[in-house]
Image: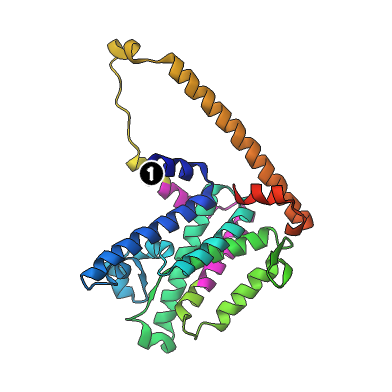
Amino acid sequence: MTTDWKHLYRQGDAVMRLIWVNVCVFLVVSLAGLVLLLFNRPDGLLLQLALPASFHTLAHRPWTLLTYMFLHGRFWHLFFNMLCLFWFGKILLNYINGKQLVGLYVFGGIMGGLMYMLCYNIFPYYAPMVDASILLGASAAIMGITVAAAMHAPDMEIRLLFIGGVKLKWIACATILISLLGITGNNAGGQLSHIGGALAGYVYTILFRHGTDMSRPFTRLFDNIANLFRRTRKPQDSSRQFHYQRPTNINREHEANQQYSRHKAQRDADIDAILDKIKSSGYQSLTDEEKRKLFSN
């Protein structure tokens, strides 16, 4: 079963992998929280992973600037964030590669977290809430992806329930406006982080157009971390190598890999064609078969 999950993870693109990570973190934290609740410590793990507003507390938990953006307290919080990540992430993958999208996700999350902390420590309005406030959720990271997608394809339409077709640029503007109007509301910290994430998406896209990739430091960091956990194969004794080789199985594996590569290339081509059709004619122009292919990718 573990092998099947790994296979599904490796088959997915950057968007699906981010969704997998968020879902897995949610399940692990929820189960751990259930156990901690039995010991009357319901928020122990959450407080260790969520981003505090206090810089003094952050100094003792610096990892929270990264972990908070994969953390969700409620199922519907996770569901709607992952839905937005799927929609706008898939669009953005037409313009940047998977590693760049992951880097932008982290960049947007960090910018959103810093915006939240700076505002809570600068403006007197938030002073009474600094010590007790925490931030969690992928919204700021997804906001960066949303703004970047809107800047790359401003006139692409997405059909919204009860509204109809709305261009990406207006969706991004409306989301930013709603966040600005909510910075003194019940979710002030979340709205401030959205603005920081939106700023990250804007800065990233402007610099990207001028040849500077802001996601590169993050992708390098992730590659270095992955290399630390990558298992190195032990060299085989040359005197025994002949006895343990199985040419038939190797050939079969090679053929299977080739077949999978051809299938993936065809699937990617089909998805690109569908996205081009959405861009030119809107989502409503898709056939049932095209919709099935799009959401089963």
Residue at point 52%, 26% (across, down)? 256
- Looking at the magenta stretch, what is its main secondary structure? helix
Residue 264 against residue 172 in the figure, above or below:
above
Picture quarter with the N terminus: top left
* Quarter assignment of residue 283: bottom right
Residue 220 on the magenta span = yes
Q: Which residue is mark 1?
A: 226
208, 51: nearer the viewer: 51
What's under tag 1, amino acid-wise? Ala
Percent of width and height locating residue 42: 28, 72
263, 110: nearer the viewer: 263
Drawn side of residue 172 relative to residue 157, left or right: left
Residue 200 visible in the picture: no
Percent of width and height locating residue 39: 20, 70
Residue 13 against residue 108 in the figure, above or below:
above
Where are the magenta residues, as a range?
A: 194-222
